[in-house]
Amino acid sequence: MNAAQEEMIALEEQLRVAMLGADVDALDRLIAPDLLFTTHMGQVIGKQQDLDMHRSGLLKFRAIEAGERLVAVHGPVGVISARMNLVGSFGEAPFNLDLRYTRTWRQGDDGRWQILAGHMSIA
């Protein structure tokens, strides 16, 4: 794994910790304003919807475990495909899901990486 790929893995770990802790400030820094995220149910959400779910407690994670990961970085764009086990609740409904996700990161002119797009599906 090269340095750029290791940086992507480190960003993913920051994201994982922020999601587990519902750290909306960290999530705000990691997510691009124009995020397009497709959930495993086919819904498309943006940054504010994502942050609001964490802020309100509607979406709570108890565990987020990454399995196999593929990482590609080309200049200011990084793409990660990983298998994830997510345990938590959405509202009153508990979940324990085995998902495959693809996340696209882009590096801004200021050097900061943010998530531009994501997609999840049942693995």
Image: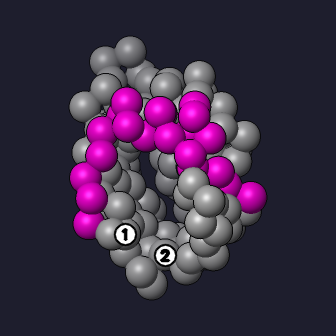
Tell whether position 61 is magenta.
Answer: yes
Query: Percent position (x, y) of residue 55?
Result: 57, 31
Query: Percent position (x, y) of residue 105?
Result: 37, 43
Circle 1: element type:
loop
User: Are there few (<14), some (14-19), or many (20+) residues within 10 Å of tag 2?
Assistant: some
Residue 99 image label: 2
Q: Nearer the viewer, residue 112 or 37?
A: 37
- Front disc: 2 or 1: 1
Tell whether position 70 is magenta.
Answer: no
Residue 40 image label: 1
Please, what is the three-letter code of the amino acid marked with disc 1? His
Which quadrant of the view contains residue 85? bottom right
What residue is drawn where x is 70% and y is 48%? Answer: 20
Query: Percent position (x, y) of residue 52?
Result: 47, 33
Look at the image and give the residue range highlighted in magenta: 42-62
Which quadrant of the view contains residue 26? top right
Q: Are marks 2 and 1 in contact (CB under 8 Å)?
A: yes
Please, what is the three-letter code of the amino acid marked with disc 2? Leu
What residue is drawn where x is 25% and y is 52%? Answer: 44
Q: Nearer the viewer, residue 65 or 8?
A: 65
